[in-house]
């Protein structure tokens, strides 16, 4: 992962908290967490059905 991106995530309390939460799931590391946060900034603001619809999968 890009060092600049890692620093950005760590410097922002919201992104840092989201990163820690996403990484608490099995199999999700820093790179996957950064991708999820950057592509789905709505995470944490929508329920699971809304996020599933946003990304085009069925829940």
Image (cartoon, grey):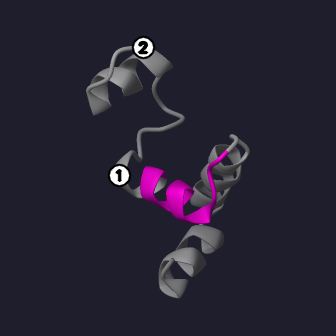
Q: Which mark is residue 59?
A: 2
Callout 2 secondary element? loop
Residue drawn at x 37%, y 23% as measured from the top left: 52
Q: Main secondary structure of the magenta part?
A: helix
Query: Taking 59 as reference, is 52 above or below it?
Result: below
Q: Is residue 35 magenta?
A: yes
Residue stretch in magenta? 27-36
Instruction: Looking at the picture, tell me which residue is in the foreground, 42 or 26.
Output: 26
Instruction: Looking at the picture, tell me which residue is in the foreground, 40 or 35.
Output: 35
The reply, left or right, for residue 57 in relation to residue 48 is left
Residue drawn at x 53%, y 64% as measured from the top left: 31
Q: CA distance from mark 1 to mark 2?
A: 19 Å
Residue drawn at x 70%, y 53% as measured from the top left: 20
Residue 12 sits in which quadrant?
A: bottom right
Callout 1 secondary element? helix
Count residues near mark 2 (Cα–Cα under 10 Å), then give few for <14, some for 14-19, many for 20+: few
Query: Taking 6 as reference, is 33 above or below it?
Result: above
Q: Name the residue that disc number 1 marks.
A: 39
The reply, left or right, for residue 33 in relation to residue 13 is left
The reply, left or right, for residue 16 in relation to residue 49 is right
Which of the marked residues, 1 or 2, is nearer the chain's N terminus? Answer: 1
Q: Position of residue 43 (x, y in %)?
A: 48, 38
Residue 15 sits in which quadrant?
A: bottom right
Count residues near mark 1 (Cα–Cα under 10 Å), then give few for <14, some for 14-19, many for 20+: few
């Amino acid at each position: 992962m890009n060092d600049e991106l890692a620093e950005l995530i760590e410097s922002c309390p919201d992104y840092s908290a989201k990163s820690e939460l996403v990484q608490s799931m099995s199999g999700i590391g820093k790179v996957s967490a950064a991708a999820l946060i950057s592509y789905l900034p709505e995470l944490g603001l929508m329920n699971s059905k809304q996020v599933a619809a946003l990304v085009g999968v069925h829940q």
